[in-house]
Image (cartoon, rainbow, N blue to C red):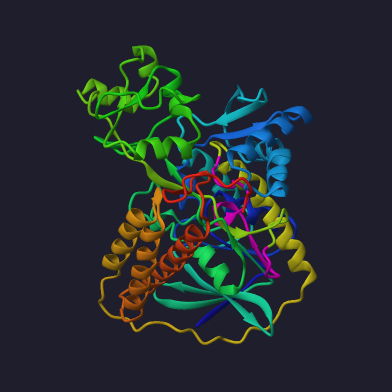
Amino acid sequence: MQKIITDVVVVGGGLAGMYAALAAEQQGCKVLMVCKNKIGRSGSSVVAQTVHRVAKQNTLNQELYYKYFWESGRFMGNPELIKTLISEGPRAVNHVISLGVQFEKDVETLPNGGEIIRYSCEPRIGKLLTTPVAEQVRKSEICRLENTMVIDVIFQSGELNGLVCLCNNEVLLVAAKAVILATGGFCKIFSETSNPMGITGDGQAIAARAGARLTGLEFIQFYPYRLRRPKIFDLNPAIFDQGAIFINEKKERFMRNFPKAEQENRDTLAQEMFKQHEVLLDLSGMNQKDLEKHSVLADLVKHGYGSQLKMQVTAHFSMGGIQINSKCETDIPGLFACGECTGGIHGANRLAGSALVECAVFGPRAGRSAAIYAKKNPAQIIAFPTIDLPPLGKDNIHTLVSSLRQLMWTKAGIQRSEDDLLQCRSELMELSEKLTHLQPSSYQQWFEAKNMLQISKSVVESALARRETRGSHLRIDYPNENSISQ
């Protein structure tokens, strides 16, 4: 068992993690990043659509944006975190620009009259965000440990003082004064998801096992803008300002009577789409000039697929996660978190363009907070802990994971009921028991399955406890929103 010693360790290689690592290093700390894949090429950041929406820097606009944000999250967001996101958003985006990201920007008007600035890269490819930031990490003194999975934090004498990692089935120990979790969401627990491989709820599971509080796990954003056939990709919602509409199998425009039609809040739109037998994207109302601005769609129409553009609602973003305060502190001293692995900012529904601003605001905050904590706490000598690993073998973990994901999609997905959730809970327990008897060829696959099962059970328990429909959480047996937030 090898051991590495550092001041601050950041778990995750996406935007939130990179921002955190750079901020911690700027405070004079020795920083290590640990990532399951390649730093700057992992997680959801690399496939993001690059959009950052921030309020104009004046009191009125920020107040209007706060009201819009608060209402869109169905009054479940943490006011302290929302105010921090909105007040620091413009400065955070300017910092991202200073790292070499090239944005285009325009002004949008909110339904309540507020004005926000939209920053985006064209084309909307996440690598245009992650590549310049990853280059800053490479130029720094930040140490990097890639293709390595963190499996747990270490406590000795009541203090958090490091991590246990796996690299090529070998155990590695990292001694650190402060730990930042920036591992992304957990939507890979669903069979239908826009998330890339590896988004398995590792940070949330690690934090929960350490005793940190999780919040809002029942709130999953199901993304309505994913084309499934004849090609899989995410639509640019701007097409609905240019004449595109959704129709069902009866050729009905089922969103016609909603105030914002196909650009309704994502929770409402996804739920209405799910009610249809089939949803098609109708581009007949777009003129050729506008259509050509969307090259993939234009190419599909050119090749005769214009009447065959089938949509699929998909699990996209986990609004719930590790509970933090505005300093990105969890309730475990020395453990910090930022990005999609946290919960409390978005409430029951996430506004478009806010996830990447969240990374830009809270990533640096987590880095600074962890560095301050590390400077105040002396290094501790860590003894090698006992690691409980399953015996290696040739058992197929993928079959179990596939069953888990299909179960969560059918029983704990967009529409939920007590009967389905109770059945889901029972079957999850059976899968958990089965996992304990498997002998994997890869420890990483086994621990990812363990984390997915743990988070899935927590999602189900949260969904059972919330006996109402609120935002993205749709209980068909409790169709109304309670008058008082729970």
Count of marks overlaid on the render: 0
- Compared across the picture, whether 30 is left or right of 437 comes to right
- Front position in the image: 206 or 475: 475
Task: Identify the residue at image location x=36%, y=27%.
Answer: 254
- Compared across the picture, whether 344 is left or right of 228 comes to right
> Which picture quadrant has residue 189?
bottom left
Task: Identify the residue at image location x=54%, y=31%.
Answer: 120
- Front position in the image: 260 or 204: 260
> Which picture quadrant has residue 424?
bottom left
Q: Vertical placement of 315 versus 36: above or below?
A: above
Can residue 345 be found in the magenta stretch?
Answer: yes
**Residue 340 percent across, percent down from the top left:** 55, 52
Residue positioned most to the left: 304
Can residue 55 be found in the magenta stretch?
Answer: no
**Residue 432 percent across, percent down from the top left:** 37, 74
> Quick check: can you spot residue 442?
no
- Magenta residues: mostly which secondary structure? loop
Look at the image and give the residue range highlighted in magenta. 330-350
> Quick check: can you spot residue 473?
yes
Task: Identify the residue at image location x=26%, y=26%.
Answer: 300
Task: Identify the residue at image location x=29%, y=63%.
Answer: 403
> Which quadrant of the rendered structure holds the C terminus?
bottom right
- Compared across the picture, whether 21 is left or right of 310 comes to right
**Residue 272 percent across, percent down from the top left:** 39, 36
Q: Vertical placement of 412 versus 77: above or below?
A: below
**Residue 69 percent across, percent down from the top left:** 63, 37
